[in-house]
Amino acid sequence: MNLLTHLHTRKSWLTLSLSVGLLTSCNEPLQEEVFSFISTVNFYKTAADADAAVIAAYEPFVSDNYYRRNLYNVCLLADDQVTIGRNPQFQEMDNFNMAADHPFTTNLWVQMYRGINRANTGIKRIPGIDMDATRRASLMGECYFIRAYNYFNLVRLFGGVPFTTDEIETVDQTNSPKASKEVIYEQIIADLLQAESTLPTSRTGIEVGRVTKSAAQTLLADVYLTLERWPEAASKAKAVMDVGNHQLLTDFTRVFAVNNENNAEIIFSIQFDGNTIGNWLASFAHAGGTTNPNCANGVQVWSVEEKSDMWLNWDENDKRRAFTVYDRFVNKAGQTINVYNTERPFPAFGKYNAPNEVNESSCPLNPIVYRYADVLLIYAEAASQAAGAPTAEAYAAINQVRRRGYGLPLGTVSAQDLPAGLSREAFRSAVLRERSLEFVIENRRLFDLMRTGQFPAILKTQGKNINERATLFPIPLAEINANTSLTQADQNPGY
Amino acid sequence: MLHFLIKIPGKYLLLLGLFVSSAYAQTPGNLTISGIVTGRADGQPLAGATVVVGSTTQGTTTDANGRYTLSAPAEGTLTVSFIGYLAQNVPINRRTEINVALAADPNELSEVVVVGYGTQRRRDLTGSIVSVSAEAIKEMPITSAEQALQGRLSGVQVIQGNSSPGGSLSIRVRGGNSVRGGSEPLYVIDGFPVYNNIGTNDGQSQPINPMSAINPNDITSIEVLKDASATAIYGSRGANGVVIITTRRGQVGAGRVEFEAYYGQQTVRRKIPMLNAQEYMELTNERARNIGGNVPYPDFSRWTADTDWQDAIFRPAPISNYTLTFSGGSESSRYSISGNWFDQQGIVEGSSFQRGSVRLNLDNQLSSKLSLSTNITASRAMTDQARTSINFTNGIVYSALVAPPVAPITNPDGSYFNIGTVPTADPAWNNPVVLAEGFSNGLVANRFLGNTNLTYSILPDLTFSVRLGLDYTVNRRDRYLSRLLPGSTGNATITGSDNSTYLNENILSYRKQFNNHSLNAVGGFTWQETMASSFSANSQNFALDIFGTDNLGAGSTLGAPTSSRSLNTLLSWLGRVNYVFNDKYLLTVSARADGSSRFGTGNKWGFFPSAALAWRLSEEAFLKQVDWLSELKVRTSVGVTGNQEIGNYNSLARLGSVAAIFGANQGRVIGYAQTSMPNANLKWETTAQYDAGLDIGLWSGRVNVNLDYYVKNTTDLLTSVPVAISSGYASILFNSGSIRNQGFEVAVDATVLNKERLRWNMGVNFSTNKNEVVSVAVEGGQFFAPNISSPVDLPVNVVREGEPLAAFYGYVSDGLWETNQAAGSIMPNAKAGDLRYKDLNGDGVINTADRTILGKPNPDFIYGITSQLTFGPFDLNVLLQGLEGATVFNANKYSIGDAFARNANQLAEVKDRWTPENPNLNAKYPRLSNVNPLVSDRFFEDASYFRLRNIQLGYTLPTSIKWFRSARVYVSGQNLLTWTSYTGYDPEVDSVGGGDLRQGVDVGAYPSAKTITFGVKFGF
């Protein structure tokens, strides 16, 4: 249709221009005619437009600088379980001594805010669209969730940050001022309460992978946990447990299997098909280059920090260990290779396996944001903290996770259960250690270290030359330079 | 050199004078003499050439077929002359048939010069315009016309980014003006304006050169318009200069056939000396001992291979070209038709370029008032690209340097060896031969370029012409990564694009001479519109390699198809007046108003005026008596031009499609989001240029000197201005910032010798350009180019106020550490023998703040020397060319000269190193270890060079051979000698290319070749 109109204008133009010199106003034909994209004017009219706006708010998650790899490069390298033996940019992240212009934090920041801006767009535009009210509320719920999750990541990594809930369309709407952590958390909680009340309890068919009520509740539980609002954290986690839509798989390895994505344990994960959109998880985790059968090219961007408690003290009988980390592997030729005899003599991670990925960036696994083990461990920690001592339910929650780790029946008392009668502090330590083993390279460890005040000091004990004046990541220099509402005084300490 | 040139001709002229006068001994008795006068370059008859007897006025002119008949003394001399050619004195020696082939006069080259929307006599020019003749274009084998500009024209720099067959070139006329708006000149091919968007190396495919669609043999002249007076008529497209290409047209006369062909061999110009297998094992073992590990090669006898990977991927390669031209016609209808086949195999395995083209130029006099001029070119160019990508692990050339020599090419069973299994290899490295075999990347570019110009003479002095044209290109790229490549399961991609540009120009021309006044005016209205569309489809996971890209359905994993369409429109009013009074005072005023769809709603129309004045002092009474001074013209011009290469749709708020995956079956779901912020004020980049020039002609034009000084201030640079990234946007396109280019140009052409059997023309040109970024609209007054790919992973070019555009940036090395360092040192982790760097800011630590400017990719000056020597039937043409003051970032060396930091094979010179046994602090290389070097001055090299670009020796056979009207054979050589201190393949390199800010970077670039060709040219 566009093309036809266009040809018509061209013909008339030829006629017109042949009759030289009669033209006075020539602006009309100079309006740009667009084909491969649309403009804001003729959009946000229908239910389909509303859905497209929400999809766009999810899209930053699958970008290179978020769940495809960069979020992991930041959260994993900076924790105490992951290291890298090369490349200064990665080593700065590993040693937590990056400058404010570090591209990883800068690029991650952009994607988080892109998600926020698109969620803000949805929140502003969708109410004006004439459509089914329940569907509208559900789509709004997704926007609230996405905004809350991005701000949650920002506030945990960077502290107080530029904050807005308005859509940004033009350059004069940029320059959001910095808000305090407290203000941002307030908005996060408000958004998640909204999301919780409007999101559907489950997703089927073409909507599998989009957020649910349980996802909102789990996120909210995590927010409360981070804020040490224990009763609320416990109650939100309990709500997810009580609904019963999710459960632990009996086999830990099946949680991460290529052919078993979106299994009963997954509460929210970022969807990749590995074909049109893939990620780098498998190749970044594994060793052995193209000879490793579990990935296209094991480049070990993330290697095991051999000074970590996880590597040094993880019980060999825990079945999760052999699956999660290794120092020898069987290559494609069937030979057993000891990683210490290779050019990159570090143990590697085996958690993400993509044996059929076409190249190193086409891992089809869905990076997990929340799974049911999270809910159980959040509940265990929060319930015990709230009650002043571990409750039976708290024990039951963590023991389920431990039994599954050892390959034991989930409902049967076992020798691997936590000893009874632990103090509140001892129980919390046990939960935190459990989290450190359960969620290796799942972006949990750094946030646990941060919320318990161990970060970055724990890196120093591993001999890393850290930036001791900093406890948070730097607000990107590009933001401070370009945002007229910020000055160097708004930078986090240590940068 | 300049001094020498100016002095010498005078002496020879004097000698020549004596010679000629002594030959004038008249003897009685007249003969009737007839013959044909032709142009030496193309063998075409020259109609209207003057043939006179000796120094008398007695003579005649040639007819439409170049024939003449006259009566002259049997022992006399004929003087044959024609505008734009060197006059020739021919002793009659009692002959009755004398055919004369005149050589084009390089000084008077095209007495008539093609300018925008018209022609002008060279003597009437007020602007700065330089030309290259057909003869010069044919001196060496070239793929596309712009290569012929190299070294021949002042102020014109040709940058051969990568030397792959069909690879793209950048042309910089008086320096680069733009940060991201493109700095390529506008090309006008037989009246059709074409922007040569050469693209950049995206790491997968190298850009191809759209100009390679035109057969260089078809070209009669190339004009380069440099100053604003000449380019302002092209308005918003004139800021980077304009290159006008004119192809051959038919001449009145009997039908003629011409056949030209050459065949040559190319070999890699230089191999980089690398370590052999024995040295590699010894040195990697030493590295392991230095860093306290097990030696990787305890037993040398296990590794019997000693592979020279450069030999494995380079090959001698043929180049050939065949052109057949038919031309002729009558007063009312003339034609020139040519067919061309060009075939260049690349010196890197798996690369080639082939072109088949047909051109048809017609001139028809429809009535006494109406004439039609038509130009049509149809061509098909096929490029096979070797994967000389900028990527560290999968570029062929890069891999061949990095690959361990201990690895064999193949296993005993004939399969390819996986070099990632060598103990010291990075598992990600690929066998270079597998990269050549396993990767195919073919581009077919079909181009139709045609336009027809109908001219109506309203009055004898007033004509109106309408030009209609179409430039239509259909390209298709087929890329296949075979299963041979490690990790690949077969990956096929087909990308197609379809671009059409319609042109309509309506021009009114007026020419009038009255008394002492001469007026030449043009005015008109033009419309040009380009629609571009593209699509791409991909498929992976093939069971077999046999299909390549010919059966996408055979792949079990289908990628998402993509497509796009865009449109831009340019409407223009233009006008120019040339006024000459008394042949002394010249004035040119021109202006163009351009309306472009690309500009923001607030700035749809731009106005580009210019004015120029010239004064031919040589016509003044006080200088007219000075007979050695034939021309003295001072000229000055000022004007404003623009650059509209700011891309389509950049002023709009766009909602783009973005994809995510959802659903139980994991399907692609499309969302829409605003992807750019609008800027209603977006407009062209503006260049204001001032030019002052001096043209000097000495001894009746035997020596011509052109001097120019210019200043170009480009403002309103299209810049990606960062916005607060918490908006979710990184930047907005804005017009801000400015760049200044200023320079001085000298061109000298001299006919050193001019005898019948011995003629020597020489030309020298020399141009300086100083480029400076005046202001940048970014906090801190600087921003960086994109990163150089791994293992550098950093930008090395910076755009910084007060520095040249894309200046290089890095650490300063400071020899080697004598002792192990400890806390308190500027490099506390350094060991004895490690590289030491300068703590420039003195803060006691080496960090990013210690980087500084280390050079610039653009040269201080460029120069060229041409020489054409004709001795009887022999001719010798030489082109020497060079530049001074440019720097190249040798990114290859960052891997192969890093003292084994990443175990890549190393330059042979790495043997000169610090060792624990011989702790030589003056060694060229540090302790072998796993310590990564910083991006320091060690990798920025002086890329100045001087080279024998071309030398050609020809022999013209006697024209008395039956059937042949003319016949010439020649042998030529390119790049036979180069003087440079650059240690890479070639100092002429720009791996990324195009308008990218990563300039002057050598990262796996396709190396240059040395070529020897043999050629023939026959006229029938």
Image (cartoon, coloured by chain):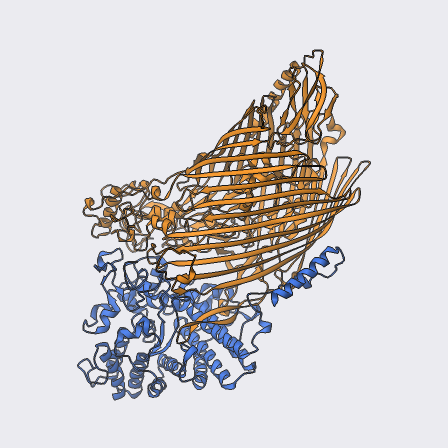
Residue B771 location, x and y as percent?
Answer: 55, 46
Q: Residue furthest left?
A: A415
Hey, which quadrant is residue B918 in on the image? top left
Q: Is residue B909 above or below residue A20?
A: above
Residue B949 location, x and y as percent?
Answer: 49, 35
Q: How many numbered marks, from 0 up?
A: 0
From the rendered image, report the letter of the chain displayed in blue.
Answer: A
As rendered, which of B124 and B814 lies closer to the eye? B124
Residue B769 location, x and y as percent?
Answer: 55, 42
Q: Residue furthest right?
A: B515
Compared across the picture, whether A29 is left or right of A212 comes to right
Hey, which quadrant is residue B680 in on the image? bottom right
As rendered, which of A92 and B790 lies closer to the eye? B790
Q: Is residue B863 above or below residue A59?
A: above
The residue located at (27%, 44%) in the rendering is: B280
Hey, which quadrant is residue B309 in on the image? top left
Q: Residue furthest top?
A: B28
Q: Is residue A293 above or below residue B750?
A: below
As rendered, which of B547 and A332 lies closer to the eye? B547
| Quadrant of the image containing the N terminus of chain B | top right
Palette colour of chain B: orange
| Quadrant of the image containing the C terminus of chain B | top right
Q: Is residue A469 visible?
A: no
Q: Is residue A180 visible?
A: yes
Q: Is residue B119 above or below residue B204?
A: above
Residue B18 location, x and y as percent?
Answer: 64, 16
As rendered, which of B610 and B462 lies closer to the eye? B462
